[in-house]
Each structure stands twice: as C-alpha cells, then as structure tokens.
Amino acid sequence: MRSRFVRIAPNEVAIADPEALKTIYSAHSGFVKTDFYLPFRASWGRYADAFTNLDERQHMERRRIVNKLYSMSNIVSLESGIDKCIEELTRKLNQCAHTEDCIDLASWVQWYAFDVIGQLFFSHPFGFLEHAHDHAGYIRALDLVVPLIAVACVMPAYIRPVFLLVGILVPRISKAMRALKHIEHASEACVVERQQLHNNIVADKHAPTDMLESFFAIVRKREERADFGSTEVKMEVYGAFIAGSDTTAAAITAILYYLLRNPPAYEKLTAEIDEAVEAGLLSPVIQYHEAIGLDYLSACCKEGMRLHPSVGMTLPRHVPAGGAVISGEWFPGGTRVGVNAAVVQRSQSIFGENPDDFKPERWLGAGAAKMERYMFQFGAGSRTCIGKNISLCEMYKAIPQLLRQFQLELVKAEWETRNYWFNKPAKVHVRVRPRKCGHAL
C-alpha cells in the first residue's frame, strides 16, 4: 500500500494526496515558500522575482504591477507574432517532410517555444527555427544551469555557498555558472538595445508593440514611485529566458507524444480538426479562440499535461506557526511540506480508472470540472505560473496546426526524458509527411 506521506529530508515531507493541494497552496493558506526557491533568484535584482519571492505581501504587490501584461487578453492581442513562428515552424517541417530523414520533435518544439518568446517580448524571433539550431547557445546554457540550480535547491541553505565555491573547481559546474552569466548578459542586452531604440525614435508611435515595450510603459507610468525601472524590466526578460521555453516545449512535446502512442486518440483529434476545417471554422493559421472551441483538442491537451507536468519536483512550503492538519495528519509549524504534480495528477480517486493511461475522454464527462480543480501543472493559488497564458496560447495553436498539415509517426516507441526541475523530453524521433484534410500525401 502506498503511503500518502514520504519523509524526503529530516524536516520535509512529500505528500501524495490531491486534497493537500487546497490546504497548502490556496491563497491566504498561511503556507509560505521555503528557501528552496532562492537559488533561482538573480543576485542583481532590487526586488525578488515572482517565482522566488518568499514575502507573500510583497509578492502580491509586485505581481499586481505586471499581471495585466500576462493576461490572456493581452497575449491574444500579440497573437500575430505567434502566427509568424507557427508559419516558420510549418515551413521548416514541410521541408523535412520531403526527405526520408526523421526529426527530433522535442528540439523543433523547443525552437518554436523560444522563438515565440523572442517574438512576444522583442518583436522578432531569435532565429532558432530559421537556422534550425540552438541560437547563441541559449538552450545549451539552460541545460547546464538548471540541473545545477536544482541541486542547490534541494540542499540545506548553509551548504549552498560552499557548493558553489567548490564548484568553481569542477568543470561541469563552472561551465554551468558561466552559462548562467550568459543568460543574464543576454537579458541585459535585449533591454539595453530597446533603451537605445527609445533614444533614437521621435515618438512612442514608432516603438514596437510587444511585451518589452509594455514593461517600459510601466516604467514611465511609475517613474515617481521609482519602484519599477530598467532593472525590473531586465528581471522580467530574465524570467522569460529561464522558464519561457522549457516548460511550454515539454508540455507540447508530451501531448504530441501521447497522441502518437495512442492511434485512436490521434485519429479522433485529426478528424475533429478536419471537420472544423471543412466547416470553415479554422483560419489558415489557427487562432486561439478557434482552437479552444475544439473539445477533443482541449481534452488531449489537459490529459497530456496531467500525465507529464513540465515541472517534476515538489513545490515546498513551510507549515504555519502553530502547526496544521494536512490530509488528516498534524504537522508542527516550520515543517517543510510539498506536493508533486506528477504524483497527485495520477490519483485514481480524482481522475478515475486507469489514471496512468492516456485517455482524453475522461475530460469529456461530468467529472471534468472536478478534475480541473486538482490539476497542478501550473502551480496553484496566488503562485500560479505567471506565464501560464503564454504557454496555453502557444500550445492550443501549434498542436492542431501541426496535425492539420502533417502526418506524424513515431520512429521509436519509448521516449527519453530528463528531470532536473523541468521534466524535459530529450529525444522524440518522428517521421513527418505532408497532409491535407483527411489523409497524408
């Protein structure tokens, strides 16, 4: 019999009970973030970023400043930029489809996700898709630095400085630390470039329409308060570099992988897409508002994220002073507790029979609303991932577009994944063929 409670450190317990989500992570629960998150914090910021801020009040105040920019309505207003990335992705895959070579779907999807960040934030893609490679080594840098940060997160705080100091002598760790600097410098360069553009334009009407420009609009609006300046803009850009591509790419790749492993679901989804095309319901590049009207697509996306959440570790919190009851057990104040999405999202009591199976139909029944309340792939409560809407928009647009235009076939049934914080698909080899409504060419 599986235990709901697993002690993973002297003062930390991982809890495998969906009911613990509301107790621990709901807004105003009193369970605050632990120092686990601090290694992700940039050392140069005036204020902690939304992810690493341990002060609940300050987190709320700081997040309120930028929340509107991450709303779905604002992301959709920039949707034409995502369209450009989808057009480039499908153009490149169409070239691949006319060869006998297989492709690594995971790489192409991450290139797409990174280029979308470039388009949304800076009005131009980085060039991952155009050149079909890791632009400026950003992905390699993240693959080096995220495992290092994850290791630092799980060790006691007093050991971290020693770990990093000694790490300078270890080639892999020192390389990861240089990679982190590379990401910091890239973030700063993007901000400085825009500041220089501002110095050269006559009026705001000549400025780009993107996330970065919106951040600078906040700077100008709050100039007298002096609480959001170029350093804070750089922090937002840095966060996009660190977390903007891996999480989205992992989700999209996982959904496509599970569809390819389950031909009946794959065929049912392509049939839904074809019917929508024939009914004139889909634009040449599928729009977000059109995609969310495809019920089976939504079911497949939710099911893929359920089975493969992009973050594969617990998200620890401190039990409030005085202690608390969690899932029927009392925990003293100060105890570190957390839930892992990859565990609770396979709970039979919530998600029904055969929770380890990919079954999109479970989301089409009467219990869908209840299941939705226990999905934890984007976090929960006031700490829900700030980039959630960017990720969803990318996902709901790219998946039906790919299945509409291409017939995908797995070369190898089993995939490779690596979990160093991000639960990242490493290799998903597929063959690609051109497709028109109803059949492959």
Image (cartoon, rainbow, N blue to C red):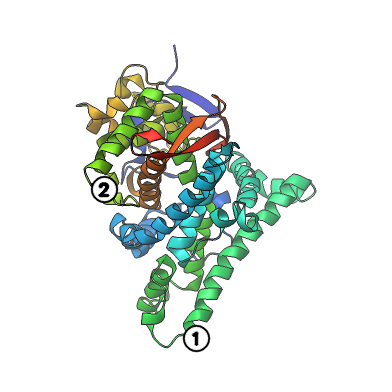
Q: Where in the figure is residue 56, as x and y percent of width and height?
A: 38, 53
How dense is the environment of label 2, judged by Cα within 10 Å: few (below 14), some, or many (20 and up)? Answer: some
Seen from the viewer's position, the closer of residues 259 and 98 is 98
Residue 31's disc is none
Q: Where in the figure is residue 354, as x and y percent of width and height?
A: 37, 17
**Mark 1 vs mark 2: in front:** 2
Q: Vertical placement of 166 versus 412: above or below?
A: below
Pointer 1 residue? 200
Residue 435 found in image quarter: top left
**Amino acid residing under circle 2:** Glu
Q: Is mark 1 on a helix, strand or loop?
A: helix
**Amino acid residing under circle 1:** Asn
User: At 76% from the left edge and 51% from the top edge, which residue is drawn?
Assistant: 168
Considering every residue shown, the one lying at the far right of the view is: 169
Q: Vertical placement of 150 versus 268: above or below?
A: below
Residue 290's disc is 2
Q: Where in the figure is residue 185, as x and y percent of width and height?
A: 62, 65
User: At 41% from the left edge and 78% from the top edge, which residue is drawn?
Assistant: 207
How dense is the environment of label 1, judged by Cα within 10 Å: few (below 14), some, or many (20 and up)? Answer: few
Q: Vertical placement of 95 versus 203: above or below?
A: above
Q: Is mark 2 on a helix, strand or loop?
A: helix
Q: In this view, does 306 lie to the left or right of 129?
A: left
